Image (cartoon, rainbow, N blue to C red):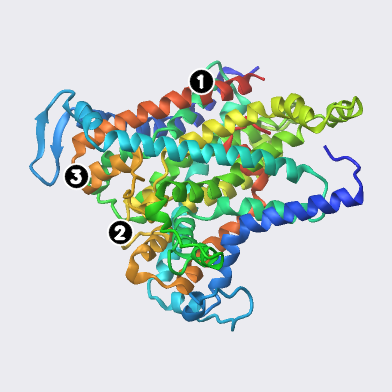
Amino acid sequence: MARAVTTQRKALNTLAAWTVGLLIFFPILWTILTSFKTEATAIADPPVFLFFDWTTENYSAVMQRSDYAEFLWNSIVIAGGSTILGLIVAIPAAWSMAFVPSRRTKDILLWMLSTKMLPAVGVLYPIYLMFIKLGLLDTKIGLTLVLMLINLPIIVWMLYTYFREIPGEILEAARMDGASLRDEILYVLTPMAVPGIASTLLLNFILAWNEAFWTLNLTAAKAAPLTAFIASYSSPEGLFYAKLSAASTMAIAPILIMGWFSQKQLVRGLTFGAVK
Amino acid sequence: MATQHARSAARLMLAPAVILLLGWMLVPLTMTLVFSFKKYLPLRGGDLGWVGFENYVRFVTSSAFWPSIWATLIIVGGVLVITIAFGIALALLLDQPMWGQGIVRILVIAPFFVMPTVSALVWKNMFMDPVNGLFAHLWQFFGAEPIQWLSQASLPSIIMIVSWQWLPFATLILLTAIQSLDSEQIEAAEMDGAPWTSRFIYIILPHLSRAVTIVLLIQTIFLLGIFAEIFVTTQGSFGTRTLTYLIYQRVLESQNVGLGSAGGIYAVILANIIAIFLMRIVGKNLDA
């Protein structure tokens, strides 16, 4: 609803919106600032905001913890692996439902959505037990599989809404021009589907990276990703504000950047196409 | 249009996703259902046989049950009210013409991308700590006694943390909905001399009702399952033991699997009641 307004009104809007925006962002800003303080400055009374001796010692301290790189690597493998596995399973499924719909397509889509609503805690023990029996507890592969399964409905849905926007007439035109099924998929459909697939990949990577029920309950030392690493700072003996901030900043920075790119897809992905 | 060949190929392409999700849903859920009718204590004797509905009765009659329902309702309800009220206000504000709109949007959305353990710990230590937290400094500055947030005001504290995480989601969806509003309608109302309040009540709010419903349902489903925020802050003490956390404690901490599974089935039923409403809305949209 962009309308012409007076400069004065616009200035007022700007002031109000920036104030609220900075207030909401403040906890993140404060974490980032604290990560550059010494431990003593971090708990100074009164708190210092900008004028302190900036230091990167917390970052090197966190990095030097022999296991940090491992937690980071676990996060990358688990989030990346579950997303890619999910895409491999979901692309054909979404594709077939979008281009060869049947009477049951709607029911299947809604049923998939319903599996996403299953409360995790309701199946915690069975999964835990199966993980013990199969030797999957505290392994990257086990967690990758679980995260793939919990995000699969979202992946299928997002892809489905993207694929449905590809007009069927284009396929007919290609067929008229003598394209084979293989040509059709490779040269016509794929280029049109890439943006949708990329957005789906991005959003699901974010969701998997931040997942904090299964990652906390199914890992211990070996396969723990950053969510579990950060949670280990909650014990009183681990309480160092500046180091906690540095570790937190490193854990959220890549995702914040990705998140900003995927804000539009966020709406589509998490409302299952119900809000556009 | 589709040939028989295409249809069978399509079924084949769909099969892996359907089979995986079917297995993921049925196998563990069946196990939970079976456990819920058993006395099952893995560390104290293991499977001690069938007990009928005893676990279901014990779960709801235990002294922890009603407080957990209360905690769940207060947290979910509190977060919903805050995120939707502020979400509407924020979406209306962000929709206005201003300088640096893109940057403000980024600032507002950011909390959604912070992993739950990080946001819970940052709030717990750097804001709510009664000695070194920023709130304590702020309270002292105004000469007030700092609050022991997570023990004295535990539920409001959790609500505050979770609302901060979910406000961006509500705002973003409501903003998307507002932007699809026909601006001519508003302009016409404006020209007819409709004051701001009636434009809001009679045009904007009805237009937003669908988006609000969707935010309500999706957030409820996610909020019923919040775990990390409680796990790293209060561990369920000070009245913050939600239904999810209670079940978690029964199953993994006290290893009373039968009892916890009965609780799990209650949680599944509860989530399904909400899911039915959400699916109806989403399903309607599929036909359109």
Q: Is residue A191 visible?
A: no
Q: Chain of mark 3?
A: B
Give the CA separation, mark 1 to mark 2. Answer: 39 Å
Q: Position of residue A205 (x, y in %)?
A: 53, 51
The residue indicated by pointer 3 is B255
Rendered residue at 42%/51% (across/down): B153
Q: Indicate left or right for A128 with B45 as reference.
A: right
Q: Nearer the viewer, residue A275 or B150?
A: B150
Give the residue type that dot 2 points to.
Answer: Ala
Give the residue type that dot 1 points to.
Answer: Asp
The residue indicated by pointer 1 is A107
Give the CA separation, mark 3 to mark 1. Answer: 38 Å
Q: Quick one: quadrant of the N terminus of chain A?
A: top right
Is there a contact, CB below 8 Å, between mark 1 and mark 2? no
Give the CA separation, mark 3 to mark 2. Answer: 18 Å
Mark number displayed over residue A220: 2
Of tags 3 and 2, which is closer to the observer? 3
Q: Position of residue A267 (x, y in %)?
A: 63, 40
Disc 2 secondary structure class: loop
Q: Indicate left or right for A90 with B198 as reference.
A: left
